[in-house]
Amino acid sequence: EVRDLMSVIDFIKSLKSIDNDRIYLAGHSQGGFVSSLVGAKRVSEIRALFLFAPAYVICDDVRETTKREKNVLNLMPEHTKDTYIKCAKNVNLYNDITDYNKCVYIFHGKMDSRVPISYSYEACKAYDNCKLIVFDNEEHRFSDKTKDVVVKKMSEVILK
């Protein structure tokens, strides 16, 4: 997935209508996890990261260091084959994301039972410039009202 996203960035940058100085990455759950890894590999090209309940728990899930009902291996067995597990085991998460030194916005629900919010707190410690926005009554997937708040914040950042 990291290679796929890097290919998407390369394609986007080749379009004449794109301002290559204003490329952002955003992702929910596993998409946030992948965006974090790619951001660290493409720092000079990515202006900011917007991460929604990033699934940083995947690294522990595949190593089975946490025995959880909502372990990614239990939730998505059809997608978590050998290659997925091998790749995820090779991620040294908080070291692998720290090269990204631009603004990171993490939006996370305090009630998230799929991805414990503690992972986002730890990520914010790893990043140089991280803003964690916590929604007290939200789970892994945000309500429409919270999505509106997130979109408003993203718009404010992008339109600066």
Image (spheres, rainbow, N blue to C red):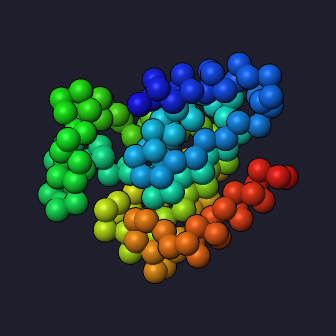
Residue shown at the point (61%, 55%) measured from the top left:
105
Q: Position of residue 155 (x, y in %)?
A: 75, 57
x then y, percent, for residue 118: 39, 63
Is residue 123 visible in the rendered structure shown here? Answer: no
Residue 159 pos. (x, y %): 82, 52
Quarter of the N terminus within the rendering: top left
- Would you identify the image quadrant in which residue 48 lies? top right
Image point 38% across, 75% down: which residue? 111
Q: Is residue 138 left or right of residue 74?
A: right
Most distant residue in the bottom direction: 137
Which residue sits furthest right?
160
Identify whether 25 is placed above or below 45.
below
Going 78% across and 59% down the picture, which residue do you hit? 156
| Relative horizontal placement of residue 11, taking residue 137 as reference (left or right) | right
Q: Position of residue 56 (x, y in %)?
A: 38, 49
The quadrant where residue 91 appears: top left
